[in-house]
């Protein structure tokens, strides 16, 4: 049987065999179903329009990192700035931790460490910067930006502090006087990070005499000269470099005293 209203599309109730009471139960069930759906829609509309709903909804959003972590290389003595960008931070707290030492550095906008060179900055609690002034070699390591969600989420960045080379005078040869034919061991040591590479050269682009060979340069901490002669005499330069400017060098003067011929008359 079909019920037709004057102002809407027809609502068709399928005919089912049985007593009139069974048809009434079907119609009642459909009316109850429509009523429940309408009630839920009304309650949902009231909830969305209620004061403070948007604020409560935003607080339920999960924070996430808006940018990927990138490592940082800074020369010793300069300022290192480690960024951390977070969306939907809300009422959660952000902390910076030195991961290698398990040291809590900052908690939200408060500095926890006693290191006076460390400070924390943010822009509307979205973009955060951990700042380390006058960085030192021992500041190198992994720094973790962590948010106290459940479970906690974090991002880790590696800070590498590089140091230009410097000659270690205690372990580096000074000017030397030897007799002709003597063997000579010159040494040059340098500090820095990364570890410097040592290269030996002679002044005025002279070649280095290594036995029967002549080479423009030698790499390594030690330079061994055998059976020196007047041709070996002169200034030697040990040059230390590690990719961090400036490179440094030391000039070592080798004096070879030649043997005098004694002619009998």
Image (tube, helix red, strand yellow):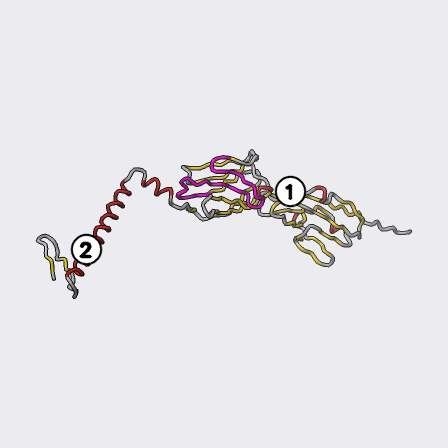
Question: Could you say which is closer to the camera, residue 149 or residue 237?
Answer: 149
- In front of the other: label 2 or label 1? 2
Residue 85 to residue 226: above or below: above
Crowd tier of the residue under label 1, counting other residues whose Cα lies within 10 Å: few below 14, some 14–19, many 20 or above = some
Q: Quadrant of residue 214?
A: bottom right
Question: For this view, does 91 lie left or right of residue 22?
Answer: right
Q: Position of residue 149 (x, y in %)?
A: 45, 45
The extreme right residue here reads 265
Identify the residue at horizontal 40%, vertical 44% (top origin): 87
Residue 19 to residue 194: above or below: below
Q: Secondary structure at mark 1?
A: strand
Question: Could you say which is closer to the camera, residue 52 or residue 180?
Answer: 52
Identify the residue at horizontal 45%, vertical 47% (top origin): 150
Q: Secondary structure at mark 2?
A: helix
Give the magenta-colored segment's residue range. Answer: 84-110
Question: Could you say which is closer to the camera, residue 144 or residue 76?
Answer: 144
- Inspect the magenta stretch and tell me whether residue 92 lies in it: yes
Residue at numbered disc 2: 28
The extreme left residue here reads 6
Question: For this view, does 90 lie left or right of residue 144?
Answer: left
């Amino acid at each position: 049987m079909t019920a037709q209203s004057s102002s809407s599309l027809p609502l068709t109730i399928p005919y089912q065999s049985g007593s009139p009471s069974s048809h009434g139960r079907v119609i009642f069930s459909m009316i109850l179903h429509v009523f429940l759906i309408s009630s839920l829609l009304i309650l949902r509309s009231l909830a969305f329009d209620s004061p403070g709903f948007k604020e409560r909804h935003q607080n339920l959003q999960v924070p996430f990192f808006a940018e990927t972590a990138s490592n940082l290389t800074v020369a010793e003595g300069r300022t290192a700035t480690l960024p951390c960008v977070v969306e939907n931070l809300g009422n959660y707290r952000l902390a910076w931790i030195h991961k290698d030492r398990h040291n809590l550095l900052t908690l939200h906008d408060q500095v926890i460490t006693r290191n006076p060179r460390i400070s924390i900055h943010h822009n509307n609690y979205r973009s955060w910067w951990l700042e380390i002034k006058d960085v030192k070699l021992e500041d190198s390591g992994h720094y973790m930006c962590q948010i106290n969600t459940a479970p906690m989420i974090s991002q880790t960045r590696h800070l590498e502090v590089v140091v230009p080379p410097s000659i270690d005078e205690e372990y580096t040869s000074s000017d030397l006087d030897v007799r002709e034919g003597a063997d000579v061991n010159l040494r040059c040591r340098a500090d820095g990070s990364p570890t410097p590479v040592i290269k030996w050269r002679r002044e005025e682009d002279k070649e280095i005499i290594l036995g029967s060979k002549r080479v423009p340069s030698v790499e390594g901490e030690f330079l061994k000269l055998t059976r020196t002669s007047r041709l070996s005499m002169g200034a030697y330069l040990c040059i230390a470099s590690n990719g961090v400017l400036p490179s440094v060098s030391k000039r070592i003067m080798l004096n070879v005293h030649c043997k005098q011929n004694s002619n009998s008359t």
